Image (cartoon, grey):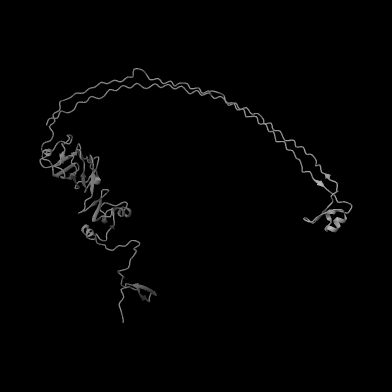
Amino acid sequence: MTSISSNGKVAYIYDQASQTWFPIAGTTNTAANYDWTGVHEFSSNPVTFNEVLYAQGGVNNFQNPNARDAAIPSAPDGLVCFIRQTNAGEQINQLQYYYSGVWKNLVGYSQISNKLTNYTITAGDAGKIITVDSSSSNVITIPANSSETIVAGYKIEIVQLGSGTTSIQPAIGVSLKSKGRESLPATVPESPLEFDSRYSKITLLKIDTNTWLAYGDIIESSSSVPYSFTPTSYSFTPAYSFTPTTPYTFTPVAYTFVPATPYSFTPMTYTFTPVAYTFTPVAYTFTPNSNCADLSLISNPQTCTSCGGNWNATYNECSDPNAPAYSFTPVAYTFTPYSFTPVAYTFTPVAYTFTPVASTFTPVAYTFTPSTFTPLSYTF
């Protein structure tokens, strides 16, 4: 039976004029994996930001932030990606965009950063929730834009988890606005904002270069009246003069090194006396045969007896009982051992003398005269 396959085949059309076969389009196997190489342009129309967000399943899709950073080590501002999990494997399915050196969550999931003591906000905290879990009083400081650049429009949420009172303190030059809070000159430090109670939350929203808006669970007394400061006009003209009474002179002690006892090396005298060896050979006795030839060669008892010998039936041998005994005296050997007299060595080391260079240190005399300081007189 005829069937239709989803696997495409390449078809060709022949051009007789150029004598060339040209491939024409065929069907595509949608279940197959394709490796794209080179530069491909799929659309000449611009893609909107919302279209990128709607395509979250297939645009810069990564399992976790580590995989994202490995694939995109240097991201341009405005790049969008989709993260399925945290590095710990928790499911988040979060859209993120890159701006000013930091990946930011677009919606939904917020990263939590826990602190245990005083802390100064950084650009990396933008979009996060900062929890403070401490049993002691602590301060969260908002830095000036000159020391920590945080783009206007970002917000940071702060939650007091511990029993210790958490307060928010703007740095000099930072204006922190909240309900009922007065604005102060940039050179005057503002009073801190305090949380209403444990588990309270205050949201900080940066609205200008050095201007933040605070709203949430704030103690009203901490945002109603600024500090009243009426300093007295002080005139400070110190005249400190520092002249050392005696110039410092440094004379090092002269060091001389003489060994306590010259080293002398006298080796021991060795005497070698070998053991005297004496050689005494065993005395050999030789008994020759009688007139009846060599009796030791007679092999039967009858002949042995007829020759006057004694037959030994045990050993089947014939011996002459009257044979004279011969004595054997070996040559006497004399051994004279070697004598050894070693050469006597004497060692006398060279005597070393060490005399360091004498150094003299005379410091420069310093005179310190500070400037005159007259502060401005503030009245609030």
Image quadrant of residue 267? Answer: top right
Quadrant location, the C terminus:
top left
Relative image position of residue 361 (x, y in whole percent): 41, 22
Relative image position of residue 63 (x, y in whole percent): 29, 57
Q: Is residue 83 left or right of residue 227?
A: right
- Determine the residue positioned at 24% across, 54% down: 96
Q: Is residue 103 left or right of residue 297?
A: left
Q: Is there any visible trace of residue 179 in the rendered image?
A: yes
Given residues 61 and 325, the one toward you in this image is 325
Q: Is residue 110 above or below residue 367?
A: below
Relative image position of residue 365 (x, y in whole percent): 34, 21
Q: Is residue 219 above or below residue 105?
A: above
Q: Residue furthest bottom?
A: 1
Q: Is there any visible trace of residue 174 in the rendered image?
A: no
Q: Is residue 243 left or right of residue 145?
A: right
Q: Is residue 6 above or below residue 367?
A: below
Q: Is residue 255 above or below residue 62?
A: above
